[in-house]
Image (tube, rainbow, N blue to C red):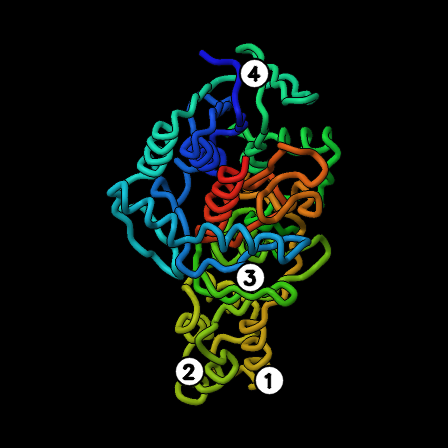
């Protein structure tokens, strides 16, 4: 097998496979390396095994980056509709679930198989279970591995970031970027469950497993989706979304009756059915166990015995429950990593490092983080395609 290539891509995940396939189909001699034994491991577990591979509503505002303009170029060059065309071309059936989220009808394995087929069209050489020990650059890049040394004109960092370490996630791309003089932004878990302590956790722990619709807010960010109470705090789509915006010491606000004015509803129930128990009244607007928890805080057994001001105060709390998380579940439970290689050091139109010719960074390794719902995969496809077209 060859030891000399035009392009060496490190990381056989979503971004890396896309990049390798596109570069190979341009006639470049491409080597794709990964320390894992199988490609696309995060693809395989995503979307409950059905891969939420993109989102119909994908737009620049669905992404977080210190440079809010950087990702616009890649997303415009290769859109969600371009990836859908590829999926259709390979005959993979799919469906829209909610909020523009697209999933395979069958299995996420179909997306991995599609990307491998595209790599085969580009004659990409793939080496799995191959650990990189050193990377140097003189006139070309030299990659030392436990399978020997390889050289290439271009090197693409596509190894992702720190989320889900049990699947082999590491800070490899960040380390190599720093080696070549590229900066890093703040790095932290994102799309991650929030944890609580003290009184908030005492209330939540017995309610573990309760789910409900809510609107979660943190600062100016607001998401209307599902919420799940857990034995350590809160999870579910709405919570994962705001976790990307939350910082230590800040509060989040939950509207757990987003379809109605809870204060007006509780006062109306009192007037219509004064003898009903508060738990029963709350059960009309909240899941039973959660209704019981809030009712236990009330000092009366009948709605008639509760002053309107007490009911209004409770209703206002239900529409604006202010909570202070103590932390997050960390990288072990984070779907993605916020932050990464500073985009100031990259060319937005090519994904190449501005000061290091032939060095590219793509996907989750870069300081571009999408919302929950297929956005991070679209960033992988878009940034991978752009690098593949330019490496």
Q: Label 3 neighbourhood size at 10 Å, few (<14), some (14-19), many (20+)?
A: few
Task: Please tell me the numbered disc located at residue 150.
Answer: 4
Whether residue 164 is visible, yes or no, is yes
Q: Which residue is mark 2?
A: 275
Task: Please tell me the numbered disc located at residue 309.
Answer: 1
Find out whether the residues at labels 4 and 2 contact each other: C-beta distance under 8 Å.
no
Tell which tag, 3 or 1, sits nearer the viewer: 3
Q: Which residue is mark 3?
A: 61
Where's residue 82, x and y in %?
Answer: 38, 50
Tell which tag, 4 or 1, sits nearer the viewer: 4
Q: Label 4 neighbourhood size at 10 Å, few (<14), some (14-19), many (20+)?
A: some
| Secondary structure of residue under mark 2 | loop
Where's residue 141, x and y in %?
Answer: 63, 22
Find out whether the residues at labels 3 and 4 contact each other: C-beta distance under 8 Å.
no
Tell which tag, 3 or 4, sits nearer the viewer: 4
Task: Please tell me the numbered disc located at residue 318.
Answer: none
Q: Label 2 neighbourhood size at 10 Å, few (<14), some (14-19), many (20+)?
A: some
* Sequence-first tag of 3 and 4: 3
Tell me: 33 left or right of 322.
left
Give the vertical position of 288 relative to 126 (above or below). Answer: below
In three-dimensional space, the C-alpha distance between marks 1 and 2, rounded to whole angstroms, equals 18 Å
Tell which tag, 1 or 2, sits nearer the viewer: 1
Where's residue 333, x and y in %?
Answer: 54, 41
| Secondary structure of residue under mark 3 | helix
Closest to the observer, 84 or 151: 151
In three-dimensional space, the C-alpha distance between marks 4 and 1, rounded to whole angstroms, equals 74 Å
Find out whether the residues at labels 1 and 2 contact each other: C-beta distance under 8 Å.
no
Where's residue 264, x and y in %?
Answer: 49, 85
* Sequence-first tag of 1 and 2: 2
């Amino acid at each position: 097998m060859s030891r000399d290539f035009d392009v060496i891509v490190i990381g056989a995940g979503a971004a890396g496979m896309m990049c390798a396939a596109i570069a190979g189909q341009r006639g470049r001699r491409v080597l794709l390396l990964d320390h894992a034994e199988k490609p696309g491991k995060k693809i395989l577990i995503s979307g409950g095994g059905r891969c939420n591979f993109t989102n119909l509503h994908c737009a620049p505002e669905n992404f977080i980056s210190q440079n809010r303009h950087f990702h616009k170029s890649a997303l415009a060059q290769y859109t969600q509709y371009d990836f859908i065309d590829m999926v259709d071309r390979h005959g993979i059936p799919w469906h829209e679930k909610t909020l523009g989220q697209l999933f395979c009808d069958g299995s996420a394995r179909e997306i991995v198989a599609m990307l491998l087929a595209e790599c085969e069209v580009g004659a990409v050489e793939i080496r799995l279970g191959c650990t990189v020990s050193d990377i140097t650059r003189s006139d070309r890049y030299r990659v030392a591995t436990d399978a020997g040394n390889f050289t290439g004109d271009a090197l693409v960092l596509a190894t992702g970031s720190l989320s889900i370490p049990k699947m082999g996630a590491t800070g490899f791309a960040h380390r190599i970027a720093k080696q070549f003089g590229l900066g890093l932004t703040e790095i932290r878990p994102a799309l991650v469950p929030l944890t609580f302590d003290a009184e908030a956790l005492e209330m939540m722990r017995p309610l573990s497993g309760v789910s409900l619709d809510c609107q979660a807010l943190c600062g100016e960010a607001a998401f209307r989706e599902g919420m799940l109470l857990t034995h350590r705090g809160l999870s579910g789509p709405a919570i994962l979304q705001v976790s990307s915006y939350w910082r230590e010491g800040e509060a989040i606000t939950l509207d757990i009756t987003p379809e109605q004015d809870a204060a007006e509803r509780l006062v109306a129930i009192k007037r219509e059915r004064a003898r009903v128990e508060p738990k029963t009244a709350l059960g009309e607007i909240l899941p039973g166990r959660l209704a019981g928890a809030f009712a236990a805080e009330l000092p009366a057994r009948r709605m008639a015995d509760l002053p309107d001001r007490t009911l209004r105060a409770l209703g206002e709390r239900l529409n604006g429950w202010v909570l202070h998380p103590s932390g997050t579940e960390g990288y072990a439970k984070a779907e993605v990593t916020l932050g990464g290689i500073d985009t100031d050091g990259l060319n937005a139109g090519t994904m190449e490092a501005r000061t290091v010719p032939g060095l590219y960074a793509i996907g989750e390794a870069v300081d571009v983080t999408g919302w929950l719902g297929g956005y991070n995969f679209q960033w992988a496809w878009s940034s991978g395609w752009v690098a593949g077209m330019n490496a």
